[in-house]
Image (tube, rainbow, N blue to C red):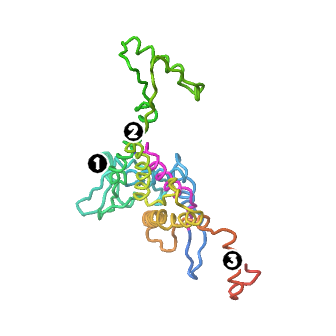
Amino acid sequence: SALTFSAVYSAVRILADGVASLPLTLYRREDDGDRHREESNLSRLLGQRPSSDLTSFTWRRAMMSHALLWGNAVSQISRSGGVPSALWPIEPWRVRLERDASGALLYSVDGGAVRLKSADVVHIAAFGTNPSGWGISPIQMARESIGHALSAERFGGSFFGNASRPSGILEYPHKLDDERRQQLAAQWKAANSGPSNTGSTVILESGMTWRQTSIPNTDAQFLESRNFQLSEIARFYRIPSHMLALNDRATFASVKEQQRSFYVDSLRPWLVQWEQELERKLLPGNGSLYFEFDVGAMLRSDARERWEVHRIAHDAGLKTKNEI
């Protein structure tokens, strides 16, 4: 139901597509501090095809959608000869956290039909206070705001779609019987409804008058309330408001800065969690290998800013023309 509210749908798409579309690379850290791209079955698994059914993009987008809606995203790690060979997403509503007799964390699927060790599960979680790392559903936290917004949507559909208030009233000085009243209503509708009759001249008879009605301010204010609910969803998901089309007060410069802050405030916490979780579960004990999202294209400045940086570097003697 929450996804039928455009702001929730957009917020989930923005963050899920953002994580899914960034290149995810496996690097090897050298002793001299340099790094090199590592080409292996594991890098192809994460960067191209986590399983026979999913591409890397669709797998990451599904995982992020689960985390953004239910608060948790879970994938089982299949191994071949101890090496990860596939990642299979599990719907989060089927999973519960448990601990065995020794206190080790277990992921119980379908009421205990399957129990997976923590080492065999990739788990991406939304914000939460559970020390085991189980996240809280953002939808659950925002349920009041979303419910209010959906109510406003239903009101708007009824008000504008079904004309819950008449645009005007026909006043007649005498009493009308039911048959005459129905005839007048049918004649008025036929003469004045539809786009072909827009702007046509109305002829009234026998002392009949037309009185136009207006929308009360209390009803028209639902548009303001709707915009407020868009801002609420932007706050819950930590997304710049302009990305949900709330840019009436934004300038080009401010939107540009908000775009940069989208990475810092919105996307980066998710990327860090992804990188650390993949390294912990897929690269245990291997300190020289690590995963990293490539955010260079997202953070790249425009041409004018780049050339200004080059000019400063050249004038300060930090770079030669050939290096630039």
Which residue is pictured at 53% across the width and 24% down the height? 193
Q: Does label 3 or label 1 sit earlier along the sequence? A: 1
Q: Residue at x 52, y 65 (%)?
A: 263
Mark 3 lies on residue: 308
Q: Which mark is first along the chain, 3 or 2? A: 2
Mark 3 nearby-residue class (10 Å; few <14, some 14–19, many ≥20): few
Residues under labels 3 and 1: Cα distance? 61 Å
- Residue 253 x, y percent position in the rendering: 59, 66
Q: Amino acid at mark 3?
A: Glu
Q: Are marks 1 and 2 in contact (CB under 8 Å)?
A: no
Q: Is residue 222 left or right of residue 204?
A: left
- Find the distance from the CA under tag 2 to the CA under tag 3: 53 Å
Q: Residue furthest left?
A: 101
Measured along the vertical axis of the image, is residue 163 above or below residue 191?
Answer: below
Q: Which residue is mark 2?
A: 155
Q: Residue at x 56, y 81 (%)?
A: 31
Which numbered marker is on residue 112?
1
Q: Residue 203 in the image: x percent, y percent? A: 53, 21
SS state under label 2: helix
Which of the two residues, 205 or 106, is positioned nearer the viewer here?
205
Q: Specify which label sits upstream in the sequence, 1 or 2.
A: 1
Magenta-highlighted residues: 3-26
Residue 88, image x and y in percent? 45, 50
The amino acid beneath tag 1 is Gly
For numbered disc 3, what is the local secondary structure? Answer: helix
Asked where in the image residue 134 lies, by quadrant, the reply is bottom left
Closer mark to the observer between disc 2 and disc 3 = 2
The reply to whether callout 2 and callout 3 are in contact (CB within 8 Å) is no
Please state the total of marks drawn on the protein image.
3
Q: Is residue 23 magenta?
A: yes
As helix, strand or loop, the secondary structure at mark 1 comes to: loop
User: What secondary structure characterizes most of the magenta part?
Assistant: helix
